[in-house]
Image (cartoon, rainbow, N blue to C red):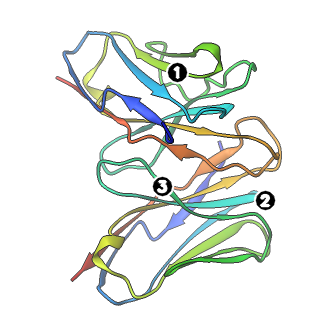
Amino acid sequence: GAGVSQSPSNKVTEKGKDVELRCDPISGHTALYWYRQSLGQGLEFLIYFQGNSAPDKSGLPSDRFSAERTGGSVSTLTIQRTQQEDSAVYLCASSLKINRGREKLFFGSGTQLSVL
Amino acid sequence: GQQLNQSPQSMFIQEGEDVSMNCTSSSIFNTWLWYKQDPGEGPVLLIALYKAGELTSNGRLTAQFGITRKDSFLNISASIPSDVGIYFCAGQLPTGANNLFFGTGTRLTVIP
């Protein structure tokens, strides 16, 4: 597709279960970001992938959170043993980093995660 | 990470009024981006700025890259109800791998 695609759009899970959120970036985009947005709040950076470099995981809130990016394209964000405070919208964004310092991020519509 | 101070946090305005919001930082940025987020959607890029002093328009929206490279503002003229949403600024440092930072957002409400 033309844009960043995220699935599922909504996910309801029980506390303690694991969830996987998927992101399909724009084809050819080398950089991929995951953000978390709690209700009415700003964007909280989680993790960043750029090409074949080691990901920047500095934003992951706990070791229950992990992400991978297979083949430099699709990314999966996994949350293990979900807690109610994990409830939020998880946004993925991708960009084509051509010139240093000139980057435009394009966002998906997000996955609304609700942990009961 | 870098701190981007975005203000105001929220605004309630009458339809037809002009709106102004801004972002400031203690760091020098190479790029300023402005995004709008509608309810239930991801942020959408409105304007990208790449040069100090640059003034760019997109319809009723105008954004400027501050001369000091530490700030940017976004103006919306003659607001309409569909301008409702959350507006985010983002600044990019000249170096570093993960070098893009977002402001905390301005929530705009337009009263018809």
Residue corresponding to mark 3: B44
Answer left or right for A68 relative to A9: right
The residue that appears at 32% across and 69% down in the rendered structure is B84
Q: Nearer the viewer, residue B72 or A6?
A: A6
The residue that appears at 30% across and 45% down in the rendered structure is A39
Amino acid at the residue labelled 3: Val
Residue corresponding to mark 2: B28
Answer left or right for B103 relative to B77: right
Cα separation between marks 3 and 2:
24 Å
Residue B57 location, x and y as percent? Answer: 60, 78
Q: Compared to A4, does B21 lie above or below?
A: below
- Tag 3 subunit: B
Q: Compared to B15, does B39 lie above or below?
A: above
Q: Secondary structure at mark 2?
A: loop
Amino acid at the residue labelled 1: Ser
Q: Quadrant of residue A95?
A: top right
Disc 1 crowd, CA 10 A, few/some/many (<14, 14-19, 20+): many
Tell me the tag on residue B85.
Answer: none
Residue A81 location, x and y as percent? Answer: 32, 10
Residue corresponding to mark 1: A75
Cα separation between marks 2 and 1:
31 Å
Q: Secondary structure at mark 3?
A: strand
Q: Nearer the viewer, mark 2 or mark 1?
A: 1
Labels 3 and 2: the sequence-earlier one:
2
Cα separation between marks 1 and 3:
20 Å
Amino acid at the residue labelled 2: Ile
Q: Quadrant of residue A53?
A: top right
The residue that appears at 38% across and 42% down in the rendered structure is A109
Residue B87 location, x and y as percent? Answer: 45, 63
Circle 3/circle 2 CB separation < 8 Å: no
Disc 3 crowd, CA 10 A, few/some/many (<14, 14-19, 20+): some
Residue B1 location, x and y as percent? Answer: 65, 41
